[in-house]
Image (spheres, helix red, strand yellow):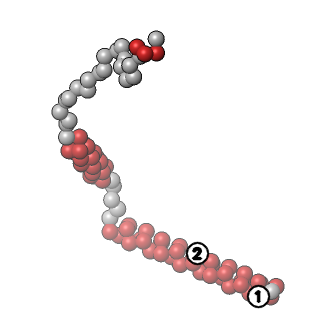
Amino acid sequence: MADNFVKGTKDAPKSVAKSTPKKNTRNFELNKTWGSIRDYLTSVYNELKKVHWPDRRTLVAYTIVVLIAVAIISGLLYLYDVILGLLLGLIL
């Protein structure tokens, strides 16, 4: 019984791979990527058209307010740093 067994044979037929021409998927993915970027930039442009931009006088006023706030906070942080440095110098 073992003599009749042939190694490597199967009862089921082997499936043959279909040879279909490959699409150029790289070009498709590249076009899809550039299309997505174009759509994004178009929507950004459309949203920026809806923005109410301040006039020059208001912009200068807000800029001055921000610069003053940054200067005050920087000064406070400097004072805290100096005070804590002196306290640590006394402790150590």
Q: Which residue lies furthest to the top in this view?
A: 1
Indicate whether 19 appears above or below 33.
Answer: above
Q: Relative to residue 54, is residue 89 depicted above or below?
A: below
The residue carrying pointer 1 sits among few (fewer than 14), some (14 to 19) or many (20 or more) residues within 10 Å by Cα, namely: few
Residue 73: mark in rendering: 2
Q: Which residue is drawn at 52% across and 74% down?
A: 70
The residue drawn where x is 37% and y is 23% is 8
Residue at 37% x, 68% y: name it: 59
**Residue 33 x %, y %:** 27, 46
Left/right of residue 85 with respect to residue 77 in the rendered view = right
User: Crowdedness of circle 2 by 10 Å Cα count: few (<14), some, many (20+)?
Assistant: few
Image location (x, y in percent) of residue 29: 25, 43
Q: Report which residue position mark 1 lands on.
A: 89
Q: Which amino acid does label 2 sit on?
A: Ile
Q: Which of 41 and 30 is in front in this view?
A: 30
Residue at (46% x, 11% y) in the render = 1
Q: Which of the image's four quarters has the C terminus? A: bottom right
Q: Give the alpha-carbon distance from disc 1 to disc 2, as whole Å.
A: 24 Å
Q: What element carries label 1?
A: helix
Using residue 87 as the reference point, say whether residue 27 is left or right of it: left
Residue 10 x/y as whole percent: 37, 17
